[in-house]
Amino acid sequence: MSQDSYWVLLSRSQRGLTVCLVTLALLASEKVFAQTAKPSTTGPS
């Protein structure tokens, strides 16, 4: 395996990891927003 293809593979995996992290961050923020937007059912009425 040449060094060039190694760096290409590394940059691809880094890009994939970045996409994954961004997706997780978006999902987490949506979850938090959904929880804060809805009135809590466990609180006193």
Image (cartoon, rainbow, N blue to C red):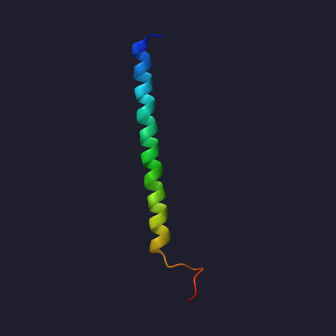
Q: Residue at x 44, y 18 (%)?
A: 6
Q: Is residue 5 above or below residue 35?
A: above
Question: In this image, 40 relative to 14: left or right?
Answer: right
Q: Residue at x 40, y 27 (%)?
A: 11
Res. 5 image quadrant: top left
Which residue sits furthest right? 42
Residue 22 location, x and y as percent?
42, 47
Question: In this image, 40 relative to 4: left or right?
Answer: right
Q: Is residue 33 above or below residue 6?
A: below
Residue 25 location, x and y as percent?
45, 52
Residue 29 location, x and y as percent?
44, 59
Q: Is residue 26 above or below residue 6?
A: below
Q: Residue at x 60, y 80 (%)?
A: 42
Res. 30 image quadrant: bottom left
Q: Quadrant of the C terminus?
A: bottom right
- How many numbered marks does the figure carry? 0
